[in-house]
Amino acid sequence: MQTVLITGCSSGFGREIARYFLAHDWSVVATMRTPRADVLPPSERLRILALDVTNPNSIREAVEAAGPIDVLVNNAGVGAASPAELTPLSTVREVFETNTFGTIAMTQAVLPQLRQRGAGVVVNVTSSVTLRALPLLAAYRASKAAVNAFTESMALELEQFGVRARLVLPGRAPDTRFGENASTNMHGFEHEAYEDLGKKVFAQFADTSSQITYAEDVAKAVWRAATDPSAPMHIPAGADAEAWAAAAR
Ligand SMILES: NC(=O)c1ccc[n+]([C@@H]2O[C@H](COP(=O)([O-])OP(=O)(O)OC[C@H]3O[C@@H](n4cnc5c(N)ncnc54)[C@H](OP(=O)(O)O)[C@@H]3O)[C@@H](O)[C@H]2O)c1
């Protein structure tokens, strides 16, 4: 039986990815900052472990407790929205700590066992916003674009060992806790220079008439990345992400 370790399973995409792999008879190590048994269906193939991807001790303990794993899904992430000029450097650092350095640290913690076994996949969940320049998301886009670049280079290094690395790029998913969790990372909209742009962009974020992404789209894209060796390096997830990826080609 294959084993997947997923970060950020308390809600949203991570929870759905865990459910999807459980439903496909995989052994699932669902990790969360604050472990809660009630967010996933009970299963003998499910283990829930504590993991904060910004904490090296937490990473070491979780990877040790998990034992051998075949697929790592770096899904944990935080959002942020601010004019670039007014984004506090502490917020930029916080976003990079989770989205970028957390992903890199988890990858480095798991890669030795994949390389030694000559098999395995690292799936990094970034974002379709890396396909297109959007205002007010400079720090967030940069944190995810850095993961894209890191993963693309790493994939070339890992081919020789039979280990794959893939990127899943979800579109906008208003149904997850992402917006709510990002609310502490929003700054500068009270500044008169950016007030109008803020209103315009937030009206677009709130628009329910356009195409969106559902958590199941992301779970299916991660499944494809994990199980289909012919899957492309960049896998858009969701109708909006697929349209953006097609336009970017
Ligand atoms: N929703 C969207 O529109 C969208 C679009 C494109 C890409 N994404 C990306 O998709 C991923 C999942 O987002 P989502 O929409 O499912 O949002 P979500 O519901 O807010 O889920 C994010 C998860 O990440 C976890 N997390 C945050 N900081 C962490 C840390 N330091 N260590 C471990 N876990 C941490 C959260 O756990 P806690 O419960 O402990 O906070 C939560 O489980 C993120 O990487 C996000 O950037 C989201």
Image (cartoon, rainbow, N blue to C red):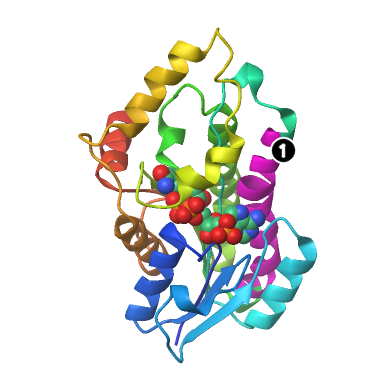
For image coordinates 45% across by 42% down, the residue present is 127
Q: Badge 1: how crowded within 10 Å, few (<14), some, or many (20+)?
A: some
For image coordinates 59% across by 73% down, the residue present is 35
Instruction: Answer with left or right where residue 83 lies relative to residue 92.
Output: left
Q: Which residue is mark 1?
A: 93
For image coordinates 55% across by 20% down, the residue present is 189
Question: Residue 191: x percent and y percent?
Answer: 59, 13
Magenta stretch holds residue 102? yes
Kindly tell me whether mark 1's CB lies below 8 Å from ligand 1: no
Instruction: Answer with left or right where residue 49 lies relative to residue 196.
Output: right
Residue pushed farthest right? 57
For image coordinates 46% across by 82% down, the residue present is 2
Q: Is residue 229 above or below residue 194?
A: below
Magenta stretch holds residue 7? no
Whether residue 79 appears in this view of the structure is no
Quadrant showing the N terminus: bottom left
Which amino acid type is shown beneath numbered disc 1?
A: Arg
Residue pushed farthest top? 193
Instruction: Answer with left or right where residue 7 lies relative to residue 63.
Output: left
Q: Is residue 205 above or below residue 220?
A: above
Question: Residue 174: x percent and y percent?
Answer: 36, 45
Q: Is residue 105 above or below residue 152?
A: below
* Magenta residues, start to end: 91-115
Depth check, front residue: 153 or 200: 200
Residue pushed farthest left? 209
